[in-house]
Amino acid sequence: MTVAFELEFEAYRPRLYALPGQPERTAPSSRVPRRRLVLAAVVVTLLVLLALPIRALGGSTLAQAAPAQGQEYVVKAGDTLASIATRADPTHPATLAGQLAREVGSTVVVPGEHVFIP
């Protein structure tokens, strides 16, 4: 390095000196690592709880409820008119399946299709 560069570097990056009368910095107390460990455990616990599906906590949504008469049902993958009718009216599923077929205009339903349960 040249002398000019060293002088220029010293002008922009001065060395840090301790002020007279100021106490020296001491090492952190033994509580600091313990507090950091507790904080890390709390953060990890919160992240795990946020990653859990809400369903695991015992809740149920309306989408999982059985279709009822007078409601509009959204067809899911694997649903048929017979399976929808069985869940909506377990006592007379064949009658309801026929009504659903007339309502839809076909015996085939597609996932995402909205079917009115008469």
Image (cartoon, grey):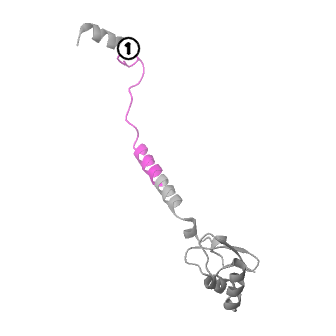
Left or right: where 24 falls relative to 111:
left
Question: Quick check: is 100 in the magenta stretch?
Answer: no
Q: Is residue 114 above or below residue 85?
A: above
Residue segment shown in magenta: 12-41
Q: Secondary structure at mark 1?
A: helix
Q: Is residue 39 above or below residue 117?
A: above
Residue 64 % position (x, y): 62, 74
Question: Quick check: is 19 in the magenta stretch?
Answer: yes
Q: Residue furthest left?
A: 1
On the rendered image, what quadrant is the N terminus found in?
top left
The residue located at (36%, 11%) in the rendering is 11
Residue 75 % position (x, y): 62, 74
Residue 105 picture quarter? bottom right
Residue marked by disc 1: 12
Q: Is residue 102 above or below residue 111?
A: below
Q: Is residue 115 above or below residue 8?
A: below
The residue located at (49%, 54%) in the rendering is 42
Q: Residues within 10 Å of mark 1 (few under 14, many from 20)?
A: few
Residue 91 picture quarter? bottom right
Main SS, magenta residues: loop
**Number of marks:** 1
Left or right: where 5 falls relative to 22:
left
Q: Amino acid at mark 1?
A: Tyr
Left or right: where 59 falls relative to 20:
right
Q: Residue furthest front?
A: 105
The residue located at (57%, 69%) in the rendering is 55
Residue 51 % position (x, y): 50, 60
